[in-house]
Image (spheres, rainbow, N blue to C red):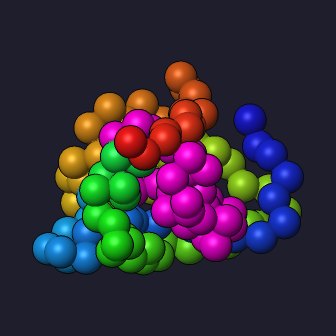
Amino acid sequence: MPRPCIGSMFIYGLKDPRDGKIKYIGKTYNLKKRYYQHCGQPGMMTGSAEICRWVVDLLPLKPEMIVLREIPANDYWLIDSIVDEEERKYIDEYKPVLNKNFTGRKQGRRGIGFRAK
């Protein structure tokens, strides 16, 4: 189902600063907010437990967020299935280890909090 959209949707990757490989691919309307959700202070991060553990294990380093594709909103509507297809295309291309359970929007992908030990 289409949903109203004010701006572009971004397909992004989180790159490991140690080896330069993309470890996770996601999508967002707000890159700055999403980066903070992934890489903010431990206990405040959202995302899968695996992503949170990876980010905490990188400390004091942080992943680099790179934009793989910007999908502009046309006529103020963005169709979720098109965005999911684009996200899947990049996941298939880069095969990031933290997307191994990618299911798209069907089962929902609400994040969980993770607290560092």
Which residues are drawn in magenta? Answer: 24-51
Residue 94 in percent (x, y) is at: 22, 60
Residue 74 in percent (x, y) is at: 76, 67
Residue 42 sits inside the magenta stretch: yes
| Front residue (pair 35, 85) | 35
Residue drawn at (55%, 60%) of the image: 41
Residue drawn at (56%, 73%) of the image: 70
Residue closest to the far top: 107
Q: Is residue 16 above or below residue 44?
A: below
| Front residue (pair 88, 36) | 36
Residue drawn at (63%, 45%) of the image: 80
Residue 62 in percent (x, y) is at: 38, 72
Q: Where, by quadrant of the figure, is residue 77 drawn?
A: bottom right
Can residue 82 be seen here? The reply is no
Q: Is residue 57 above or below residue 114?
A: below
Q: Say which quadrant the N terminus sits in.
A: top right
Residue drawn at (72%, 55%) of the image: 78
Q: Say which quadrant the C terminus sits in.
A: top left
Q: Is residue 51 left or right of residue 40?
A: left
Count of all numbered marks drawn on residues in the image: 0
Residue 18 in percent (x, y) is at: 18, 74
Residue 32 sits inside the magenta stretch: yes
